[in-house]
Image (spheres, rainbow, N blue to C red):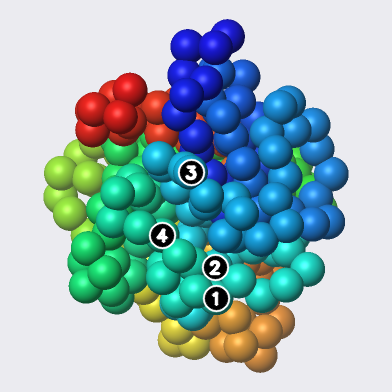
């Protein structure tokens, strides 16, 4: 397909999702360059690997940065790069005429982009992609639970904290495989929807009482709610899985001191289903380009 071969897209950094995103965009007919994947092994399907960010950006109409774009606000998230890629360096190389897309953008990053007159869109705020990502995250959580727990999930008692997109997807999937799921959330409407979906419910203020007797506890709330006090009410045999974005919601040191096993499960789609997740990002990138009049 050569429909878009006069439009170049640069994909800079990220996990395996972004490799598959580059491949998908190339298959759609775009000219695609990528950088920051020195040690990654995957089919590139026409995308051109570049040694430097500057080479990848040259002539690009669109720049796609990873999700999350950074874990520390200083370096681009590029686990497969042999060299550190500084965010400040990337931003000074991008020009105001280039459309920039990134995942889970911080306020500081957006403020700096604004100072440089850069046009930035957070593709993870696209509702369709957010829902797809939640479903992929839930599947990854299921795979992780099957691997980490010494018991079957059928009949297991599971607590899910938070009932946003990920909380809903997790609750639905774990219920479907035979778990007894309880949802703990702050909002009354969220609890009402959880009950309508067949889940047990508990108010967040009653979290201490809700954690007891659970085989698996899955947190989706990105703020510390599982401190030492709350964790002291959990069974020592419980597995606590934290799916929330940084800084997360579980005090891992407190859990360790109590003998409770925790798993920090960031970016599950990039680990368990990178091809699907990458294709979903590519579809969203294309949709944003259409809305912005690039194609």
Residue 214 visible to the viewer: no
The kind of secondary structure element at disc 4 is loop
**What is the distance, in whole Å, between disc 2 and disc 1 at their CAs?**
6 Å
The kind of secondary structure element at disc 3 is loop
Nearer to me, 221 or 54: 54
Counting from the top left corner in percent of width and height, residue 279 is at 56, 28
Query: Which is closer to the viewer, label 3 or label 1?
Result: 3
Q: Residue at x 57, y 60 (%)?
A: 54
Q: Earlier in the sequence, mark 2 or mark 1?
A: 2
Counting from the top left corner in percent of width and height, residue 210 is at 41, 63
Query: Which residue does the numbered mark 1 point to in the structure image?
Result: 86
Q: Residue at x 17, y 54 (%)?
A: 187
Q: Residue at x 84, y 44 (%)?
A: 41
**What is the distance, in whole Å, between disc 2 and disc 3 at their CAs?**
21 Å
Query: Which is closer to the viewer, label 2 or label 1?
Result: 1
Question: Farthest left residue?
Answer: 188
The kind of secondary structure element at disc 1 is loop
**What is the distance, in whole Å, between disc 1 and disc 4 at their CAs?**
13 Å
Query: Which is closer to the viewer, label 3 or label 4?
Result: 3
Query: Which residue does the numbered mark 3 point to in the structure image?
Result: 59
Query: Which residue does the numbered mark 4 point to in the structure image?
Result: 94
**What is the distance, in whole Å, between disc 3 and disc 4 at their CAs?**
11 Å
Q: Earlier in the sequence, mark 3 or mark 1?
A: 3
Q: In the figure, 21 relative to 237: above or below?
A: above
Near mark 3 (Cα within 10 A), the count class, few <14, some 14-19 or many ≥20, is: few
Q: Earlier in the sequence, mark 2 or mark 3?
A: 3
Quadrant of the image occupied by residue 295: top left
Q: Is residue 169 left or right of residue 193?
A: right
Query: Which is closer to the viewer, label 1 or label 4?
Result: 4
């Amino acid at each position: 397909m050569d429909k878009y071969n006069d439009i170049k897209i640069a994909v800079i950094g990220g996990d395996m999702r972004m490799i598959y995103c580059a491949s998908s965009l190339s298959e759609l007919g775009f000219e695609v360059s990528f950088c920051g994947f020195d040690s990654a092994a995957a089919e590139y399907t026409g995308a051109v690997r570049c040694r430097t960010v500057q080479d990848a950006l040259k002539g690009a109409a669109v720049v796609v940065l990873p999700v999350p774009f950074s874990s520390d606000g200083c370096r681009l998230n590029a686990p497969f790069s042999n060299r550190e890629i500084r965010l400040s360096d990337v931003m000074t190389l991008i020009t105001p005429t280039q459309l920039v897309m990134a995942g889970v953008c911080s306020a500081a990053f957006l403020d700096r982009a604004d100072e440089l007159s850069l046009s930035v869109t957070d593709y993870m705020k696209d509702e369709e992609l957010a829902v797809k990502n939640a479903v992929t995250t839930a599947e990854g959580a299921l795979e992780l639970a099957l691997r980490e727990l010494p018991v079957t999930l059928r009949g297991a008692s599971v607590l899910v904290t938070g009932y946003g997109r990920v909380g809903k997807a997790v609750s639905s999937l774990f219920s479907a495989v035979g778990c007894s799921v309880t949802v703990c959330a702050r909002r009354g409407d969220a609890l009402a929807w959880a009950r309508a979906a067949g889940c047990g419910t508990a108010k967040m203020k009653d979290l201490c009482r809700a954690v007891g007797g659970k085989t698996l506890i899955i947190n989706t709330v990105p703020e510390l709610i599982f401190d030492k006090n709350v964790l002291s009410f959990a069974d020592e045999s419980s597995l606590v899985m934290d799916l929330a974005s940084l800084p997360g919601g579980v005090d891992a040191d407190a859990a360790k001191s109590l003998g409770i096993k925790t798993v920090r499960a960031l970016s599950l789609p990039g680990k368990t289903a990178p091809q699907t997740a990458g294709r979903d990002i590519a579809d969203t990138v294309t949709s944003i380009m259409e809305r912005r009049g690039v194609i």
